[in-house]
Amino acid sequence: MESNKINYVELPARDLSLNKAFFSKVFGWGFQDYGEGYTAFENAGLDGGFFQADFCSRPQNGAALVVLYHDDLASLIPKVKAAGGHIEQEIFEFPGGSRFHFLDPCGNEWAVWCKKG
């Protein structure tokens, strides 16, 4: 472990099964369950997990926004929708690239970005 670096992130999920299925289908993540109320995700670029909760993580409520990277945003949007996600903000450009925001099936907001070509 490296000191002073972000090591782990935990996010709420109203339904662990829904989020596990969603992130497995769309992003290829694996999961390791730890009891009924917690699952850790694997192959996500950063260690972390989902805990059972009746609330969700949204930046407008003061939560941090987790941003993923993908080489082809346009090809990812149909996968997000087909797996039960909701596009919260369509693809937009910003200095250095473009991104979109989506809600996972439990209502947590995420972003996905791509570098400018």
Image (cartoon, rainbow, N blue to C red):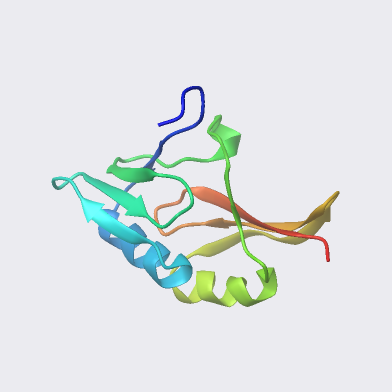
- Name the residue located 46 percent from the left edge and 57 percent from the top edge: 104
The spot of residue 95 in percent (x, y) is 86, 49
Left or right of 97: which side holds 24?
Answer: left
Q: Nearer the viewer, residue 105 or 27?
A: 27
Tag count in the figure? 0
**Extreme-front residue of the structure:** 1
Left or right of 57: which side holds 16?
Answer: left
Q: Nearer the viewer, residue 102 or 33?
A: 33
Viewport quadrant of the N terminus: top left
- Name the residue located 51 percent from the left edge and 22 percent from the top edge: 4
Residue 68 lies in what quarter of the image?
A: bottom right
The spot of residue 44 in percent (x, y) is 45, 54
- Name the residue located 46 percent from the left edge and 46 percent from the top edge: 46
Viewport quadrant of the C terminus: bottom right
Left or right of 104: which side holds 32?
Answer: left
Q: Is residue 65 above or below residue 16?
A: above
Q: Is residue 47 above or below residue 71?
A: above
The spot of residue 98 in percent (x, y) is 77, 58
Left or right of 26: which side holds 52?
Answer: left
